[in-house]
Every structure is written in structure tokens, then in C-alpha cells.
Image (cartoon, rainbow, N blue to C red):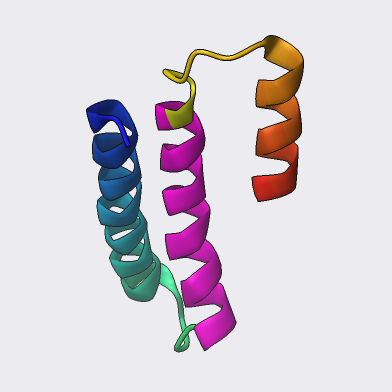
Amino acid sequence: MNKRLLIATALGLVFGVLNWLLAVFAAPKPLPRSAIATIILGRAVLGFVIGNSAWRMSWWWHGLLLGFIV
């Protein structure tokens, strides 16, 4: 794995947790577990996709790979 992918995915997790904490303080009632998982994993996947853009491969293979992952 390259460094850009690891950093972007890790920062996606960090910002996912930050968004979750902000949502907890803004929500009038407790968030369900599915919402928490969606917030955190959504940001982690976004970080992965951004970090994955550093991989050198043909455009169609890159799109196919990201389509299967996301």
C-alpha cells in the first residue's frame, strides 16, 4: 500500500469520528448505531477513494475497481 492511501483513509476515519461527535451534540435524541456506522464508514470510504487516486492504472480499470469497492 502506498502512503497516500493510508493517510487519506486514516484521516477519513478521524473526520468520520469528528462528524459523529458533532452529530451527537446536534441531535435532539441519541443516534442509532446504523447512523453512527454510516457516518464513520462513509468518511473512511471517501478517504480511501481519494487516496486510491494515486494508483497508476488505466481509467476503466480504476473505475471498475472503485465501483466494486464502493
Q: Which residues are magenta?
A: 32-51
Residue at the spot x=73%, y=46% of the render?
A: 68
Quarter of the image holding residue 35?
bottom right
Is the residue 30 above or below the residue 70 in the image?
below
Q: Nearer the viewer, residue 63 or 34?
A: 63
Residue 30 magenta-highlighted = no
Is the residue 23 above or below the residue 3 in the image?
below
Q: Nearer the viewer, residue 49 or 29?
A: 49
Residue 26, percent across and down? 39, 68
> Image check: 50 left or right of 10?
right
Q: Nearer the viewer, residue 51 or 35?
A: 51
Is the residue 10 above or below the residue 24 in the image?
above
Count of numbered circles in the view: 0
> Image check: 38 left or right of 12?
right
Characterize the magenta stretch by its predominant secondary structure: helix
Residue 62 in view (yes/no): yes
Residue 14, percent across and down? 25, 54
Residue at the spot x=46%, y=20% of the render?
A: 55
Residue at the spot x=42%, y=63% of the render?
A: 40
Residue 57, percent across and down? 58, 14
Residue 38 magenta-highlighted = yes
> Image check: 20 left or right of 3?
right
Q: Quadrant of the N terminus?
A: top left
Residue at the spot x=31%, y=72% of the render?
A: 25
Residue 70, percent across and down? 67, 47
Quarter of the image holding residue 34?
bottom right
